[in-house]
Image (cartoon, grey):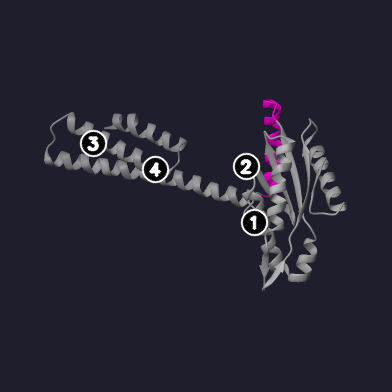
Amino acid sequence: MPLIWVLLIIPCLMLIHTYPTWRAAISLGLLFSAIKYGIELTIGHWSTEESIYLISGSLMNAAIFYTAAFFRVRYEEVLGELKKLTYIDPLTGLHNRRFFEEHMTESLKQSAQKQSTILLILLDLDHFKKVNDTYGHVCGDLVLKETGEAIRRNIHTTDAVVRLGGEEFALISQDITMKDGIVMFDRIIREVEQLHVIYKEKAVPVTISAGIAIHEGETSEAFIDKADRALYEAKRSGRNRLVVS
């Protein structure tokens, strides 16, 4: 039945290409097999040999369909895993610098179109070198992980939190006022201060400083520099605080 093949399996494969999930593949495969076999049974009276042939053909068609669907879905899964490796920091599980650069560009573009606000907070762990020198890098990694989790617990689901590298983090928040951004960081600074990281039965003190800036039409580089200067001032003026640009 070439016509049935063309009318049914090609649209099904196109749908799998558009929605590459196992649920869609299984559902469409069953639907395709049922409709094809049902049509073949209703358009004629088949002998035993012809019925066996039709059943075999339906099974073969289903096998071809599921094979094509398998490779399409696996391709999407592998592609997702590669993207995760590309954009995720392996230590903290946060987004990395590459994601930050691309997300910042896209956020500024959306902000210009929607005339919405963008806040950037650059965060830096205080005296992190001292933590590594005193307790070792294993402890330093633990502090980075715990800090990343503390930040993530206190942001909105639409915010992007990034580990830029070393002890530096960044937070991009859209459609939020400066006042709300300050309130959000107050929650972060309190939670980081209360982390109580324990390493080899010793309490490791953790605090964080930050600079916050709101986008006012400048370039991406100038926007980041504005927040960075505020962060520098927070470090210079005593640490464990937020400075507004």
Residue sitting at x 27%, y 44%: 59
Identify the residue under disc 3: 37
Q: Which mark is in front, 2 or 3?
A: 2
Amino acid type for the residue under numbered disc 3 = Tyr
Range of magenta residues: 96-116
Could you give the CA–CA distance between mark 2 and mark 3, rounded to whole angstroms? 51 Å
Which numbered disc flags the more N-terminal residue, 1 or 4? 4
Could you give the CA–CA distance between mark 2 and mark 4, rounded to whole angstroms? 30 Å
Magenta part, dominant SS? helix
Q: Nearer the viewer, residue 152 or 90?
A: 152
The local secondary structure at tag 2 comes to loop
Q: Are marks 2 and 4 in contact (CB under 8 Å)?
A: no
Which numbered disc flags the more N-terminal residue, 2 or 3? 3
Amino acid type for the residue under numbered disc 1 = Thr
Specify the quadrant of the image occupied by residue 26.
top left
Identify the residue under disc 2: 156
Label 2 packing within 10 angstroms: few (<14), some (14-19), many (20+):
few
Q: Which mark is in front, 2 or 4?
A: 2
The local secondary structure at tag 4 comes to helix
Identify the residue under disc 4: 23
Residue furthest to the right: 236
Label 3 packing within 10 angstroms: few (<14), some (14-19), many (20+):
some
Which numbered disc flags the more N-terminal residue, 1 or 3? 3
* Quadrant that contains the N terminus: top left
Q: Are marks 4 and 3 in contact (CB under 8 Å)?
A: no
Identify the residue under disc 1: 92
Q: Nearer the viewer, residue 67 or 216?
A: 216
